[in-house]
Image: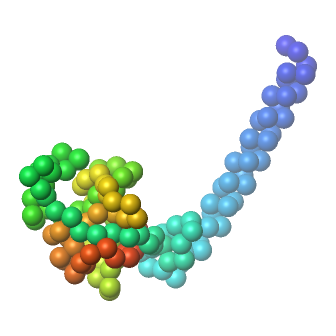
Amino acid sequence: MNPTLVQRAVWLAGITLIAAIVALAITRRDAGSNRNLPGAIAVPGTENGYYTAKAAPYGPTPAHRRTACGKPFLPTTEGVAHPVLPCGVRLYIRFQGREVLTQVVDRGPNVPGRDLDITKALANRLDLHGTQTIQWRFAK
């Protein structure tokens, strides 16, 4: 085997080992930075572990009787529609002092300026009317 290739392989292995050690050190350091927030996890770009989003209620229509996740869309269906998160992902939604555990049940929103759609049943539970700013985070 060519000595230059062996030397490159050794250098690459050394660099990979150093990168892994640095990544582990950063991860361990960040794990302790959120101890004052019970139940919250560190979320990059947030101060309290919650994202903010614009959300509005929506309900079933004759053309929208099933969610994109395959569930019947009934007036009692509680959940959120998100354009990217997979079906079934559990989220905490917080609005005006109320917090509920829910999940992604549909795709959307299809309205510019909104990040989430909230089913009417869940919006009623949160007392959310019209487009509002909410907070949300992933459930553990």
Q: What residue do we see at 36% from left, 52% from top?
A: 83
Residue positioned most to the top: 1
Q: Quadrant of the N terminus?
A: top right
Q: Determine if residue 81 is in view.
A: yes
Number of numbered discs: 0
* Residue 95 pos. (x, y %): 32, 80
Q: What residue do we see at 73% from left, 54% from top?
A: 22
Q: Quadrant of the C terminus?
A: bottom left
Quick check: 86 left or right of 41? left
Q: Determine if residue 92 is in view.
A: no
Q: What residue do we see at 9% from left, 59% from top?
A: 74
* Residue 38 pos. (x, y %): 44, 79
**Residue 96 falls in image quadrant:** bottom left
* Residue 5 pos. (x, y %): 85, 21
Quick check: 128 left or right of 94? left
**Residue 101 falls in image quadrant:** bottom left
**Residue 9 falls in image quadrant:** top right
Quick check: 126 left or right of 138? left
In terms of depth relative to the viewer, which is nearer, 13 or 92?
Answer: 92
Residue positioned most to the front: 112
Residue positioned most to the bottom: 97
In terms of depth relative to the viewer, which is nearer, 79 or 89?
Answer: 79
Figure coloring: rainbow
For residue 48, above or below residue 13: below
For residue 129, above or below residue 110: below
Q: What residue do we see at 68% from left, 54% from top?
A: 23
In terms of depth relative to the viewer, which is nearer, 13 or 119?
Answer: 119
* Residue 85 pos. (x, y %): 37, 52
Quick check: 4 left or right of 34? right
For residue 17, above or below residue 30: above
